Amino acid sequence: MSRGGMVKTKDEAERRCIVSREAQPKRGLIRFVIAPDGLVVPDLAEKLPGRGIWVAADRAALDEAVKKNLFSKAARTKVIVPDNFVDLIEAGMADRVVHLISLARKAGQAVCGFEKVKNWLADGHAKILLQASDGSERGKGKLWTPEGGRWFGHLTSSELGLAFGRESVIHGALAGGGLSKRVVEDANRLMGVRETIGGEGSTGKGKTTK
């Protein structure tokens, strides 16, 4: 088990966080590269060319990396860190999760709305329950985490609305499959970086049982 409680799986790729100096599973880290002009760029898709610099997907770790100038030390050169850098990273990560949920919706692997989500949960079709961080706790408490599945509650109703092509969404659900796996990985990273609304933006734990 790595620092922070992330369970390692056999042969899982690891990278070293520049803050903790410990090797951790790559899925729990954020990759950065240095642009030709010296700007530090978050490579959220992990596809940009250049030597990767890795930081744990954790707001405190990112804040420390900026405060202690660790990006410059890791790159061994002077770098430029944008203003409000951690907030920009959070926004980019949220956009990625919203985009992935939108792709799942278009592929017929996601639904929204209380009744549709409830039906998916009841028939075992749902593997991931999504609930808006700013939604009513009473209303959210009427649904339950899929058995053996996940619950995510750190997107706002507006962000979930964007994913489903609506103004606002409180409840959503994803079926299993490759897209859902990608949502889980990126949502886990977002969870570590986001300052949650309403104090309940956690993931992976059973929220309400049926």
Image: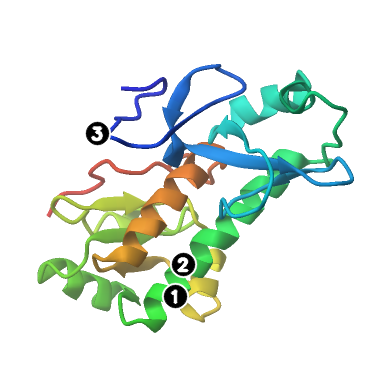
Other residues around mark 3 within 10 Å, as few (<14) / some (14–19) / many (≥20): few
- Residue 10 is marked as 3
Q: Which quadrant does the C terminus fall into?
A: bottom left
Amino acid marked by disc 2: Leu
Q: Residue at x 30, y 30 (%)?
A: 8
- Residue 172 is marked as none
Query: SS of the residue at dot 3?
Result: loop
Amino acid marked by disc 1: Leu
Instruction: Report the mark closest to the observer, 1 or 3.
Output: 3
Across and down, in percent, residue 38 comes to 86, 40
Amino acid marked by disc 3: Lys
Query: SS of the residue at dot 2?
Result: helix
Query: SS of the residue at dot 1?
Result: helix
Q: In this rendering, would 32 be left or right of 193?
A: right
State if disc 2 and disc 1 touch (CB < 8 Å): yes
Would residue 139 be seen by someone viewing this image from the given angle? no
Residue indicated by mark 1? 103
Other residues around mark 2 within 10 Å, as few (<14) / some (14–19) / many (≥20): many
Across and down, in percent, residue 194 comes to 56, 42
State if disc 3 and disc 1 touch (CB < 8 Å): no
Give the mark nearest the N terminus, 1 or 3: 3
